[in-house]
Image (cartoon, grey):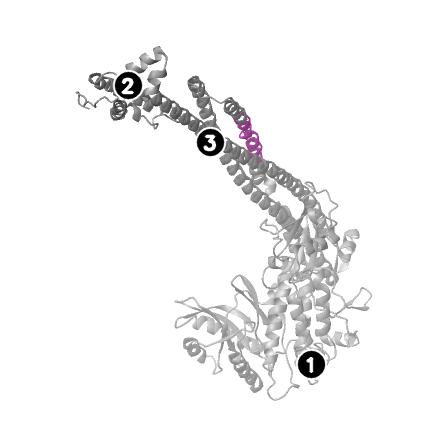
């Protein structure tokens, strides 16, 4: 009756607070978050800044001992500062003034953690067989660090349980924080305590016997909580009260971490974690070893003693070793089997490939390991660098293994193992079982159904990684295509210029060859170049590759638009929800004080299991059919790359050859010009010598003498001759200027001084001097 009266007074206090103190200055009371050992916790929000704090208010009626504990909790909270222990905040004056009307006890303000407590997470039906590996590792890291911090500050919590672990999301990461130090004991006055303490289900055995205890009581509570997070239930006879199970568990083995009661009422112990759970193979044994340290019966040895190197309890060393493990989880897409590999800090990708071969029998050269983004592991870096920071389980970080030698995966595929108890109800569907036992079996059945849906999700993610990889290859293909067609167009332009140029050169060569400048060898070389240019035109033709690339692009677009490129888990999710609802209904029956039926069969749950398995088989067939198309398309792109590379190299080689032929022709042109200049110079000097030498006049034949004489007329005719020569020179210069536009070379730059008046005048004066003819000035102007 006293407890009922106190509860009624508490409810009355709550109504008064909520009704009369909705707003305290700038702080608004939003809701009650929960109830602790000494009072209620409320959420307040600042009206201007939207800041939220949790305020713990003590109950109206507390005896002197409880008041002392309340004050001690506030003192302990204010002196602690750790990321995994909830921090105390200054109590706003407005809220402090509002609480004076209730009682004179101080308030405790704390940071607000919005994700609720660990118990809420464990009560979610999909977690009935344990949390995901990532969450377990996060819990181990956060809560283990928080407990170590408390112990280093000589504080025993004494009431560690899921309800006293709250969760907060910080920068996208879930962080666990320890709360409610109402039963915490400050060890400043000694290391042994004998006072009572917290919740019974998580208490260490020595506390039931009122024996002296140390920090090792927190090890037991933490081990019990950790086991529950892994498996979904407490380790020792979880259906019994501690008073009942302590006598049965007292004689357990040193390494026993679990005790269950079978259908015959016999207690069975185990040193291993039970299936189902969500831990990967590399973590099972280290986690079992840690639990064996934390759940030792004897307080003196609990925690594993002191590590000689770190001088800390061995359990903390074991925790850190687990958290330091770098595990790469590899999903073999050819068999749907998951493999986990503990990586060394400097282990190379080749070593990982060899280890993968041992497990999968896929040769290293045929292995392709893709991350979720479709990126292959970089062979230049150790694979450990691909792992995300912090503790991550296989549920959040996986690499996907593909066999490059295959484009169609036909199995056999590894099925998720069915728990023994679920196998029993599938075979004996109509068998009536007690509700308490049925709850455990249905929990494992629900876990199995959730697991099938998660298995499909991971395989779909593998298909998506393959698609992203294909898109990356397609991007490279487009880049190669652009480079190929750019090179092709460039070669075509060079060939067009070269072909037009050489045709014109051959035409003009035929025209000028009548003047006596010719080279049969050069002519043949030019004709050969014309034939080679025609052959190189075939090299520049890449339309056949364009057709193949366009076809691949079209197929990739179709693959992206395919309905099988999207997740097909709608029916599986519906079946999962149905199984969750069945499990909830069974839990409600078990909690009712007078269940209508003490026994029930498993018809509905078994039907849901069968439908889920059948649906998974169907959508996996569709998934692997679509995956085969992706892999086939990728295989064709990979096979096309050598053709593209070879074609680009051929185009570059053809371009270099054409440029070489062009340079050779340029050299031949200059050589031809040199010959022409030399011949012209020889003819000019010969003509000048014949014209001006007196011996040539006397030795030449009569006809020639006549011509030579006519070239040197009397002085009065010289001006007319020179004017006529100048006229012809102007015509010739004009003709050469016009011809130079179409000719590669010209005679314009040759020495034409012999046609000018001054040159002949000097020659004539020289001749007159030799014949003793007095020089005469020309009668016409120059």
Say which quarter of the image contains residue 641.
top right
Does residue 718 appear to the left or right of 216 in the view shown?
left
Mark toward the start of the polypeptide (2 vs 1): 1
Real-space Cα separation, disc 2 to disc 3, in angstroms: 33 Å
Does residue 8 appear to the left or right of 415 in the view shown?
left
Name the one closer to the observer, 133 or 123.
Answer: 133
Q: Is residue 493 visible?
A: no
The residue under label 3 is 667
Mark toward the start of the polypeptide (2 vs 3): 3
On screen, 412 above or below 707?
A: below
Residue 119 x/y as whole percent = 61, 67
For the N terminus, the quadrant is bottom right
The residue under label 2 is 728
Secondary structure at badge 2 equals: helix
Residue 502 x/y as whole percent = 46, 25
In front of the other: label 2 or label 3?
2
Residue 505 among those drawn in magenta: no
Q: Is residue 619 visible?
A: yes
Q: Give the residue drawn at x 50%, y 30%.
A: 661
For the C terminus, the quadrant is top left
Q: Which residues are magenta?
A: 533-554
Say which quarter of the image contains residue 480.
top right
Q: Residues within 10 Å of mark 1 (few under 14, many from 20)?
A: some
Residue 653 x/y as whole percent = 55, 35
Secondary structure at badge 3 equals: helix
Q: Are marks 2 and 1 in contact (CB under 8 Å)?
A: no
Residue 553 among those drawn in magenta: yes
């Amino acid at each position: 009756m006293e407890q009922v009266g106190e509860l009624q007074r508490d409810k009355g206090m709550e109504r008064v607070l909520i009704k009369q103190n909705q707003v305290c200055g700038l702080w608004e009371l939003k809701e009650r978050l929960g109830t602790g050992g000494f009072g209620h916790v409320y959420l307040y929000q600042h009206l201007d800044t939207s800041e939220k704090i949790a305020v713990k208010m003590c109950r109206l009626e507390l005896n002197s001992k409880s008041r002392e504990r309340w004050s001690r909790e506030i003192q302990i909270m204010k002196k602690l500062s750790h990321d995994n222990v909830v921090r105390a905040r200054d109590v706003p004056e407005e809220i402090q003034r509002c609480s004076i009307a209730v009682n004179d006890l101080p308030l405790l303000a704390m940071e607000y953690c919005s994700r609720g407590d660990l118990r809420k997470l464990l009560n979610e039906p999909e977690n009935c067989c344990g949390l995901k590996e990532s969450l377990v590792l996060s819990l181990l890291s956060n809560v283990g660090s928080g407990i170590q911090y408390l112990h280093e500050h000589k504080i025993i919590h004494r009431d560690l349980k899921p309800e006293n672990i709250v969760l907060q999301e910080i920068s996208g990461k879930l962080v666990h924080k320890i709360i409610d130090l109402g039963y915490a004991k400050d060890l400043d006055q000694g290391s042994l305590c004998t006072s009572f303490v917290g919740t019974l289900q998580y208490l260490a055995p020595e506390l039931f016997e009122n024996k002296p205890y140390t920090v090792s009581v927190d090890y037991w509570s933490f081990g019990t909580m950790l086991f529950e997070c892994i498996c979904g239930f407490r380790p020792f006879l979880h259906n019994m009260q501690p008073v009942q199970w302590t006598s049965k568990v007292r004689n357990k083995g040193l390494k026993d971490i679990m005790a269950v009661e079978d259908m015959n009422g016999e207690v069975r112990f185990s040193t291993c974690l039970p299936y189902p759970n969500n831990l990967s193979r590399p973590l099972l044994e280290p986690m079992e070893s840690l639990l064996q340290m934390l759940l030792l019966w004897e307080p003196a040895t609990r925690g594993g003693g002191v590590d000689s190197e770190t001088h800390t309890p061995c359990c903390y060393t074991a925790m850190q070793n687990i958290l330091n493990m770098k595990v790469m989880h590899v999903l073999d897409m050819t068999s749907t089997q998951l493999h986990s590999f503990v990586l060394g800090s400097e282990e190379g990708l080749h070593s990982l490939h060899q280890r993968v071969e041992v497990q999968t029998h896929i040769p290293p050269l045929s292995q392709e390991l893709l991350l979720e983004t479709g990126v292959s592991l970089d062979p230049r870096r150790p694979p450990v660098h691909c792992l995300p920071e912090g503790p991550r389980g296989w549920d959040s970080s996986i690499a996907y293994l593909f066999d490059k030698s295959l484009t169609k995966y036909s199995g056999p595929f590894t099925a998720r193992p069915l728990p023994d108890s679920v196998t029993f109800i599938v075979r004996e569907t109509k068998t009536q079982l007690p509700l308490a036992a049925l709850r455990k079996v249905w929990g494992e059945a629900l876990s199995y159904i959730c697991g099938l849906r998660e298995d499909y999700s991971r395989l779909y993610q593998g298909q998506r990684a393959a698609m992203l990889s294909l898109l990356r290859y397609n991007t490279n293909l487009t880049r190669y295509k652009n480079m190929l067609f750019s090179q092709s167009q460039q070669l075509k332009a060079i060939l067009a210029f070269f072909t037009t140029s050489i045709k014109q050169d051959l035409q003009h060569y035929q025209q000028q060859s009548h003047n006596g400048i010719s080279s049969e060898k050069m002519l043949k070389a030019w004709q050969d170049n014309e034939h080679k240019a025609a052959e190189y035109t075939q090299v520049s033709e890449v339309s056949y590759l364009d057709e193949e690339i366009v076809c691949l692009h079209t197929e990739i677009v179709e693959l992206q638009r395919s309905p099988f490129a999207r997740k097909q888990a709608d029916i599986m999710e519906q079946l999962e929800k149905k199984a969750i609802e069945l499990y909830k209904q069974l839990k409600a029956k078990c909690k009712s004080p007078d269940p209508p039926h003490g026994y029930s069969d498993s018809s509905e749950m078994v039907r849901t299991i069968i439908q889920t398995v059948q649906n998974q088989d169907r959508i996996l067939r569709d998934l692997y059919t679509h995956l085969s198309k992706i892999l086939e398309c990728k295989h064709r792109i990979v096979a096309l790359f050598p053709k593209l590379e070879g074609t680009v190299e051929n185009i570059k080689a053809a371009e270099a050859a054409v440029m070489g032929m062009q340079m050779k022709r340029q050299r031949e042109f200059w050589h031809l010009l040199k010959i022409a200049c030399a011949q012209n110079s020889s003819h000019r000097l010969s003509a000048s010598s014949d014209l001006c030498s007196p011996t040539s006049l006397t030795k030449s034949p009569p006809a020639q003498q006549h011509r030579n004489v006519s070239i040197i007329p009397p002085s009065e005719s010289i001006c007319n001759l020179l004017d006529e020569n100048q006229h012809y020179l102007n015509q010739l210069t004009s003709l050469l200027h016009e011809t130079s536009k179409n000719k590669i070379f010209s005679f314009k730059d040759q020495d034409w001084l012999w046609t000018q008046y001054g040159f002949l005048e000097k020659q004539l004066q020289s001749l007159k001097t030799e014949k003793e003819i007095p020089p005469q000035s020309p009668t016409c102007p120059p």
